[in-house]
Image (spheres, rainbow, N blue to C red):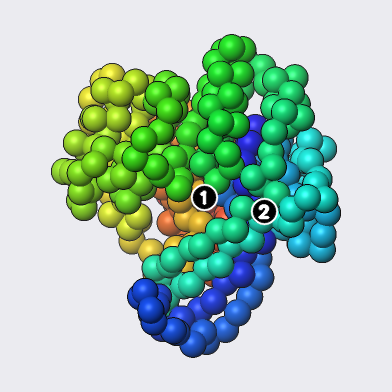
Amino acid sequence: MVLGSINLDLIAKVAQVPRPGETALAESLSMSPGGKGANQALAARRMGAETVMLGMVGEDAFAMQALKFLRQDGVDLSHIGVTREASTGLALISVEASGQNAITVAPGANAAIGADVLEALAHLLKPKDWLLLQCEIPLDVVERAIRIAKGVKARVMLDPAPAEARLPRSFFQVDVMTPNQIEAETLIGHPVTDVRSAKAAARQLRSRGVEVAVVKLGDQGVVWATGHGLFYLPGEPVAAIDAVGAGDAFQGALAARLAAGDGLAEAIRWANHAAALSTTRHGAQPSYPYWEEVWNTFSPA
C-alpha cells in the first residue's frame, strides 16, 4: 500500500543541469507520469505486488495522464481523491546525458491530502501489510499515517525525500528508512560521499530508532544497517542513460520482494537489480522493469 504524491513529470534533456542564474536550452521535452508515491506504487506492482495507491489529484486534464501507467498495470486507484481546489502535481526535471538530474516539484493536489485519505488508509491497512511513505505530501499526514500503521501492526517503509534536517521523532520509529546519500547528509548533518560515510550514516539513523536503515548510493550500490550489523552491496555495472526515478524503482521493488517473503538481504539484492535496470531506459515510470525482466537479466545461470 502506498500513500504519497502523484505528479505529471515534464522532462527536459539538457547538456548540463543549469546552475543558479544560468539558462540552459533543452534538446527535447517530454511528459510522463511521476511523483514518488505513484512511482513506487508502479515499481512495486511491476515486481509482482498487489498494490493500492492512496493520494490526491486535481480535477484536470493532467490527472488522467498522471495515472496512466498505474491504471494500465492494475494498481488499485479506487481510493484516490479528486479536488477542484488545486491542480494535479507537476515536476520539472532537467536530465543530463550522463543520467544525472535536478528536480523541482509543484505539489498541487498532493498538498490537499487530508482526513478522507487517512480514513481510507485506516480502513484498508491490516497487520503485516507494508505501507510505503515519502515526504512529497504534508508531513503531518505522513506522521498520522505512521501512527495508523503502527496501531494495526502494519510495517512502514519511509523514503525521506525531500529530506528536512528536523523531521518529527515518529519518522524514525519506522521499520525501514531509505534515504539516498544527499538525504542521509541532511538527516545526520554530515557528508555522505562513499561507502564508509554511508555506513556511519546508516548506523546513526539506527541509533535514532530506525529498525533497518538503507542508504542508497546510486551506481556505488547500497549500504544498510540492522541489529545484526552493517552491510554493503555494490552497484550493478550497467550502461546507465537516465537515473530519474531509480530510487523509486528500488523502493517499490524492495517492498514487493519483502511482501513476497524474501529475507532483507535478498530483497535488497533484487531491488538493486531493478533500480539498475531502470537506469538503462529513459523516463521514470516507463523505465520500471517487470519481475520477469529482472529475473531473466540477473538470476544465476
Q: Residue at x 55, y 58 (%)?
A: 105
Vertical comparison of 274 with 124: above or below:
below
The spot of residue 73 in percent (x, y) is 74, 49
In the drawing, does residue 43 fall left or right of residue 123?
left
In the drawing, does residue 120 fall left or right of residue 215?
right
The amino acid sitting under disc 1 is Ala
The spot of residue 27 in percent (x, y) is 52, 87
| Location of residue 22 by image quarter | bottom left
Instruction: Write down the residue under mark 2.
Output: 108
Does any portion of residue 114 appear in the rendered image? yes
| Location of residue 176 by image quarter | top left
In the drawing, does residue 260 fall left or right of residue 57?
left
Does any portion of residue 98 appear in the rendered image? no
The amino acid sitting under disc 2 is Gly
Measured in 3D between alpha carbons, the distance from the residue under mark 1 to the one under mark 2, in whole angstroms, is: 23 Å
The spot of residue 262 in percent (x, y) is 48, 28
Instruction: Write down the residue under mark 1.
Output: 249
Local secondary structure at mark 2: helix
Q: Residue at x 30, y 23 (%)?
A: 208
Vertical comparison of 128 with 10: above or below:
above
Q: Earlier in the sequence, mark 1 or mark 2?
A: 2
Q: Residue at x 43, y 28 (%)?
A: 168
